[in-house]
Image (cartoon, helix red, strand yellow):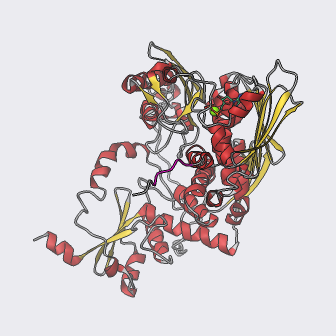
Amino acid sequence: MADRIQLLPDHVANQIAAGEVVQRPASVVKELMENAVDAQASEIKLVVKDGGKTLIQVVDDGIGMSPTDARLSFERHATSKIRSAEDLFQLHTKGFRGEALASIAAIAHVDMQTRPGDEELGTHLRIEGSNVVSQEAAVTPKGTSIAVKNLFYNIPARRNFLKSDKVEFRHITDEFHRVALAHPGISFFFYHNDSELFHLNQNSQRKRIINIFGHKTDEKLVPVQEETQVVKIDGFICKPAFAKKSRGEQFFFVNDRFIKSPYLHHAVQSAFEGLIKPDSYPGYFLYLTVDPTSIDINIHPTKTEIKFDDEHTLYAILRAAVKHSLGQFHLAPMLDFEQDQNLETPYAYQNKEAEVPGIAVNPGFNPFQQETATSYGRSGAYSRQSAKGWENLFVDLESKSSRGEAFSSVHFESEAVSGAIFPPSDEKQLNEGTTFQLRRKYIVTTIRSGMLIIDQQRAHQRVLYEKFLRSMTLKESLSQQLLFPVSLNFSDAEIRVIEDLLDQLRTLGFVIEISKKEEIMITGLPPLVPEKEVRPVLDHLIAEYRQGNESTNLSQSDMLAKALCGSVSVKSGDQLDTHSQLALVNDLFACKESMLSPFNKPIFITLTENEIDKKFN
Ligand code: ADP
Ligand code: MG
């Protein structure tokens, strides 16, 4: 048999390697910025056009390269940062694989100008798809400028795979944040399509965080500091009151390198236990310094995951350090010496004589006035009576009973309940109010054939979802004007998401202006969104939007309707009076689809007389 194995030509090998290193424009941003950091720059400029698809340029004032180095830097496995395998265990630089520039040059047009501080003339080098097009001496400032144009121009499949400019831009912003947060001692500037987005001067860690995430962040931060033989921890956690429903501002840096670590995240999250709701995430900016020999960075081509020698110890130290900060800043629960004064009997009352309670008569009461079935609550939301203590008392019970034992034998019969679920006589029954609430979670009601158990949260989500969709499709925005406008602060990136959603938000009934940098002013809300929920609702929307953009191609209105109904709906644990229960049931069965929640979960189950009979056998 003839020999069949051949060595791949370099440019093909480079293209394949590029796939590992460069997934999207943001990867290029990361590599170029890290190279600039490694080159000891004191100022780094990032210029991006069209979400990085047209141009990504990084300009630094670092050590620059000689003409030979400039040429060599684009060879695969060409690096000035390590010389031997041992060096891998003593890394003090971001890069070390010597692959980034070679990979980038294989799949884009690259234009580099570079000059070391002690040379008069610099080098201008142009490379297209791994081929050097020109190299000449040039007059250029000290440092290096690398412009990467038309990314993936020679791999159409990859180029087509890129998301919209906005999404790619958001990824780039994330990378920019990470590098800028890791190096507060370096100035960073960021321009997108000719407008300046960030102008970050050299600063302290704290100021850097605030400059990126907005001045309101200042009041949220609590310092964390700990030094042991294994690790030095520095940085900030956000106060529990500012924990969010979505993951967002959570950053770990190990030896000034941003990393992702679900394990360490868990350590922080567990330190917050009891201080934040179980489904919310604390923000943090934590800088860990460890002995470089105790970590292995080499396990991921893009190097956001690292392996620690002694993860367990690190976990314990981190958790303790965060707990300590929470305690030190009086954020952890403790004996309450500042009890709510309203609950105590004022001293002056001790000597007061008892009074006969007065009886208040409502002269306007008209027993013949009928209330309509849908007049629940002022804002149109089902009146919610929050029951704080309840949640904790019953978590156990709740988790055991919910779809666990009690109803485990009840299955969801789609056949049986489709069609006319409320024949006329049953409907009458419903309107008469034969509903009750089970564990503030389910609404139970009878129908002719037996009983119906409705998940209140899912039911309300469905009702709201259809309402929101309707007002967006019909553009029939109903808005409730606020007595006092509400102003809210958001970071730059968040404001941009709100801008993207502005039109849709308006059709929903939000009256929003972007009043200043990092601030929006709200003067009107959809009738279904209570004022105190605006902040969480918008936070939730922003988070969903960011995620949604990545994972699905859902239409914007669908995403908005889902996110909104998810956050403003009645929840399990909310008490509903009979009136609201009834209204909700009626509204549910007026929906186009009443069996499945917008998130495709069953809304109710039936328990027929037959099935009940069987249980008594
Ligand atoms: P790595 O960073 O892993 O060494 P790269 O492909 O990113 O590999 O870069 C190759 C080499 O090019 C680096 O080791 C460095 O010597 C040089 N280099 C890259 N970018 C710069 C820069 N902005 N300033 C100075 N030297 C640079
Ligand atoms: Mg590099």
- Residue at far front of view: 2
Residue 29 part of the magenta-drawn span: no
Image coordinates of residue 295 in percent, x first then y, are: 46, 25
Q: In this view of the protein, which residue sits in the foreground, 369 or 532?
A: 532
Give the quadrant of ligand 1. top right
The answer, for residue 233, to whether it is visible in the render is: yes
Residue 388 vs 230, above or below: the answer is: below
Image coordinates of residue 337 in percent, x first then y, are: 47, 23
In the picture, which quadrant includes the C terminus?
bottom left
Which residue is found at the position 74% from the left and 28% from the top? 68
Residue 303 vs 472, above or below: the answer is: above
Overall secondary structure of the magenta stretch? loop
In the shown orientation, is residue 232 left or right of residue 188?
left
Image coordinates of residue 501 in percent, x first then y, are: 69, 58
- The image quadrant that residue 475 belongs to is bottom right
Image coordinates of residue 227 in percent, x first then y, are: 49, 14
Q: In this view of the protein, which residue sits in the foreground, 404 or 154?
A: 154
- The image quadrant that residue 411 belongs to is bottom left
Q: How many marks?
A: 0
Q: In this view of the protein, which residue sits in the foreground, 233 or 253?
A: 253
The answer, for residue 323, to whether it is visible in the render is: no
In the picture, which quadrant includes the N terminus?
bottom left
In the shown orientation, is residue 563 left or right of residue 518?
left
- Residue at far right of view: 139
Residue 398 vs 220, above or below: the answer is: below
Which residue is found at the position 88% from the left and 22% from the top? 120
- The image quadrant that residue 379 belongs to is bottom right
- Residue at far bottom of view: 424
Range shown magenta: 4-8
